């Protein structure tokens, strides 16, 4: 089945996701400039959030890093290898992440890689075996990193983490397999027209004027920070079958049943993290920690994803009868109902949460479940998932 998540979230003045010049990211939609938060930024903020980690409990998540050699060296020393051999083995690990196996001397891989603890442990085992077989530092130095990447032990089955099963992995090293993402995340765009503004700021010396002979005046530094304020439409779509298949990874035994239980815990955890997490960009300066005002979760039997971004081709506006958030929700509800009716979109369930009093229309197949609280929303979602009663990841 397909689970689609739609959110409307109004942020106070902020610079949540910057471009290469430091300006808030933007785009043109419907011929009008909009605020934008990249999908990469949204995914990272959720994946690295305390909410996601807490909801998943003891379940380990993957790590995106270039510091694989350093991690490997620490584990090799802990496993009893001498510091000299561990350092040479770690240098071999720098050749991972590029097909030629070219090593470096800075304990970094050329490519940033998304790795599980199982991936790192498998590499440690291979390098430890190579070091022990070589016996001496001189012989170990002659071992090719390119050949090590093709070692059979690295090509075997290994479980992956829920974040990797959600967001996927593309990697050039033959030691680690690619993972097709089961979730698609849209760039969040503002429902309203955007006009960027500038915060002119100064920094003054706290000791200025304290000493009797100090006649300095003015600021020690001046600058400006660009910002905007926008109501964002966020959209996520999850293929639950692909998610469960990623977690099972053709493992032996009862892996699919275990993967279903993991998915039943991970999907509500993801939704909760998406609700309660915002990007960290410039938050020390703006503290734009606002929660969504509307959330729609649709469960579809057919894997035909539908975004409702076109609800905002004509930008939302604050007017005499509604503020920006109210107008955004009204446009969203009207568009979602129209598209569902006109295209006869099949839905197994529609879960609706709003801080206002806007209602969604029911369809012939499924009545809308009005959720009074976010807890009600998450509990209703859990009840729809295979193995939804389980909380063990």
Image: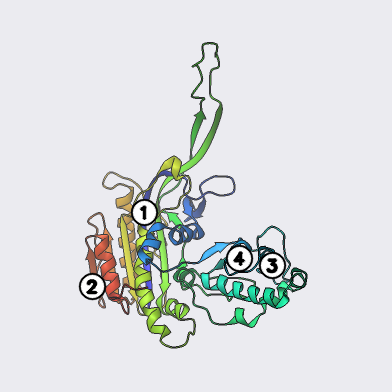
Image quadrant containing the C terminus:
bottom left
Q: Nearer the viewer, mark 3 or mark 2?
A: 3
Image quadrant containing the N terminus:
bottom left
Residue at position x 56%, y 29% in the image: 221
Spot the residue most to the bottom. 253
Q: Position of residue 237 (x, y in %)?
A: 42, 69
Q: Position of residue 37 (x, y in %)?
A: 47, 54
Q: Position of residue 153 (x, y in %)?
A: 61, 81
Helix, strand or loop under label 4: helix
C-alpha separation, residue under disc 2 versus residue under disc 1: 25 Å
C-alpha separation, residue under disc 4 versus residue under disc 3: 9 Å
Judge whether 115 appears above or below 20 on screen: below
Q: Nearer the viewer, mark 2 or mark 1?
A: 1
Please give the residue where the numbered disc 4 appears in the rendered image. Answer: 77
C-alpha separation, residue under disc 3 versus residue under disc 2: 65 Å
Please give the residue where the numbered disc 2 appears in the rendered image. Answer: 367
Task: Determine whether label 1 and label 3 are within 8 Å by CB.
Answer: no
> Within the image, what quadrant is residue 347 found in?
bottom left
Between 208 and 268, the residue placed more toward the observer is 208
Please give the residue where the numbered disc 1 appears in the rendered image. Answer: 9
Helix, strand or loop under label 1: strand
C-alpha separation, residue under disc 1 versus residue under disc 4: 48 Å
């Amino acid at each position: 089945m397909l689970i689609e998540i739609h959110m409307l979230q109004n942020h106070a003045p902020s610079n949540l996701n910057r471009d290469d010049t430091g300006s808030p990211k933007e785009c043109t939609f419907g011929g009008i400039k909009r605020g934008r938060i990249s999908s990469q930024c949204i995914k990272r903020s959720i994946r690295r959030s305390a909410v996601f980690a807490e909801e998943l409990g003891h379940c380990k998540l993957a790590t995106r890093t270039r510091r694989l050699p350093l991690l490997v060296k620490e584990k090799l020393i802990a496993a009893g290898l001498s510091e000299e051999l561990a350092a040479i083995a770690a240098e071999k690990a720098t050749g991972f992440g590029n097909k030629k196996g070219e090593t470096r001397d800075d304990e970094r891989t050329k490519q940033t890689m998304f790795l599980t603890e199982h991936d790192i442990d498998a590499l440690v085992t291979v390098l430890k075996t190579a070091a022990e077989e070589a016996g001496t530092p001189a012989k170990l130095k002659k071992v090719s990193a390119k050949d090590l990447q093709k070692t059979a032990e690295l090509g075997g089955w290994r479980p992956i983490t829920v974040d990797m099963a959600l967001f996927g992995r593309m990697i050039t090293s033959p030691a680690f397999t690619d993972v097709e993402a089961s979730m698609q995340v849209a760039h969040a765009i503002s429902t309203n027209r955007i006009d960027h503004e500038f915060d002119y700021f100064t920094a003054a010396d706290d000791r200025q004027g304290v000493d009797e002979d100090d006649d300095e005046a003015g600021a020690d530094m001046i600058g400006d920070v660009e910002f905007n304020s926008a109501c964002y439409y966020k959209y996520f779509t999850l293929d639950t079958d692909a998610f469960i298949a990623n977690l099972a990874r053709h493992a032996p035994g009862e892996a699919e049943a275990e993967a279903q239980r993991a998915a039943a815990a991970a999907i509500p955890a993801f939704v909760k993290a998406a609700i309660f997490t915002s990007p960290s960009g410039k938050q020390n300066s703006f503290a734009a920690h606002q929660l969504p005002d509307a959330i729609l979760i649709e469960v579809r039997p057919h894997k035909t994803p539908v975004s409702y971004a076109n609800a905002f081709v004509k930008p939302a506006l604050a007017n005499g009868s509604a503020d920006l958030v109210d107008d955004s929700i009204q446009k969203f509800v009207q568009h979602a109902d129209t598209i569902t009716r006109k295209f006869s979109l099949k839905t197994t369930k529609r879960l609706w949460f709003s801080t206002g009093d806007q209602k969604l229309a029911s369809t012939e197949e499924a009545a809308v479940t009005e959720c009074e609280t976010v807890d009600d929303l998450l509990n209703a979602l859990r009840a729809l998932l295979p193995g939804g009663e389980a909380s063990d990841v």
